Image (cartoon, helix red, strand yellow):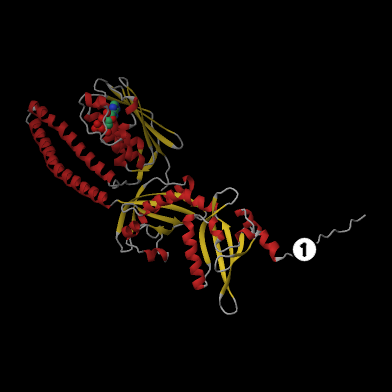
Amino acid sequence: MLKSKQTRRVPPASGDTLIEAIPQLVWTARPNGWHEYVNQRWRDYVGLTLEQVQSVWAHFQFIHPDDQEGNRMHWEYALETGAMFEHEERLKQGPTGEYRWFLTRAMPMRDETGQIVTLFGTCTDIDEQKRIEETLRPALERADTLMKSKIIGIFVTEGEQIVDANDTFLRMTSYTREDLRAGCMNVLQMTPPEYMARTLQARQELDTQESMTPYEKEYLCQDGSRLPVLVCGVVFQHSPRQVIHSVLDNSARKELEQHKYDFLNIVSHELGTPLTAVKLQTHLVRKRLEKHSQHEAATELSRVEGPVKQLERLIAELLDASKIQAGRLEYVRKRVDLDELLREVTDTMQHTSPSHTIVVRGSVQTSLIGDRDRLGQVFSNLLSNAMKYSPDAKTVEVELSSSEEAVTILVRDHGLGIPREQCDKIFERFYRADIARLRAIPGLGMGLSIVAEIVKGHGGTIVVDSDVGKGSAFTVTLPRRREA
Ligand code: ADP
């Protein structure tokens, strides 16, 4: 049997029911503060009946003493102007005596003569919101202080658009706040083409790690100039996604680097020219002595050639180091036959340094795209180190191998070795292991940092495995195919 559909009769909502249903304290009052009506929620909150508050300003006892003055001023202003009364104030909960924050709003109502006769008011509990604000205040103040930094430029992006920036960043880039508001500041548009790839890489880093490693770049300023900076960023809001960036003006450092680079360029040129003359002259005189069978004198003279070569190498290293620091080490990208290059390097080294026998095992049987001279520099540097740091050994070994992905060149010596804890450091500029210094083996500690940079520039890696007193093995791995 079908059940008859039951209908529930809902009584029509009266004004009173509605007022009792809303989550606010509701009241009406005369201009003199006499409460004519308060809802049940109001009465429960203060713990009094309507009759108990029906006297002039009786409700004032529930307003926190510090907020009473503000309440009175806003009340008077509302009566004078007819504007909405609006005041944040603490109201005392009658039963517990505790204060909670409320937003009190009231609309002044006029009679037919234009006289304000009643105020219709509500008090909304905003205590939780206020407490959150209080908790956040120190953080907000700190953020505000940071934004006022005179040294660090700070800006916020949504996508590529800069949506906020501190005065320092605007000053650095010669944009105005109006430009910012008008949406004229766009990170990609402010990035010169040569920094685009690095900037996009940093964006990707942000996507995966929510923060980016600080990196150096330049911004195109509003006045057309360029600003070298050190920049980093971190995601601080997800919807909409916002990234906060901090920027340090790098121009002073860049200028200094340029001076240093220019200085080293001049110095190496000034040192190199007379050195070439000395080398040439020595060579000529030695030839002449040999021609006249003055072999003893020729041998004496040939002793100059070693230190001259050492000086030449030193100057070249100084120049390379300054190029690396200025980001100006450039590579020619051509097909290089590695076996042929290695043969050439080992033959030359064997010829100039007969103290050790260079034993080559295996072959790579492949070519790769790279800079022939620079790769040659890597292998000759590793070989000359291997000989230099194994003064008592007779051989130095080179082992070559390749896989589908990469070629491996290993240079092994049976010499002094490097303490384990110093193995990573030897690739840093000017770092020399204790043994090298103690044994007074000449060197500046620059060669390996250049080697590591060149290997990195070819997308490869270099590692060392070493045992003190037994020897060292340096392994260079170069990828066979690289993205253009
Ligand atoms: P340099 O040889 O001019 O000091 P490098 O940058 O070529 O500079 O090498 C850095 C340091 O690494 C050297 O000072 C030395 O302590 C250590 N080193 C490099 N190669 C070897 C090696 N084959 N055996 C032992 N120590 C080495």
Q: Is residue 281 left or right of residue 10?
A: left
Q: Which residue is mark 1?
A: 11
Amino acid at the residue labelled 1: Pro
Residue 113 pos. (x, y %)? 57, 80
Q: Is residue 151 left or right of residue 128?
A: left
**Above or below for 435 versus 107:** above
Secondary-structure class at tag 1: loop
Front one among 131 and 400: 131
Residue 209 pos. (x, y %)? 47, 45
**Above or below for 69 versus 250:** below
The answer to which image quadrant residue 119 occupies is bottom right
Query: Mark 1 CB in 8 Å range of ligand 1?
Result: no
**Above or below for 372 versus 290:** below
Residue 9 pos. (x, y %)? 81, 61
**Above or below for 121 versus 440:** below
Q: For the residue carrying disc 1, how many other residues have a C-alpha within 10 Å: few (<14), some (14-19), or many (20+)? A: few
The quarter of the picture where the N terminus appears is bottom right
Front one among 451 and 237: 237
- Find the residue positioned furthest to the right: 1
Badge count: 1
Q: Quadrant of ligand 1?
A: top left
Q: Residue at x 31, y 37 (%)?
A: 451
Front one among 51 and 85: 51
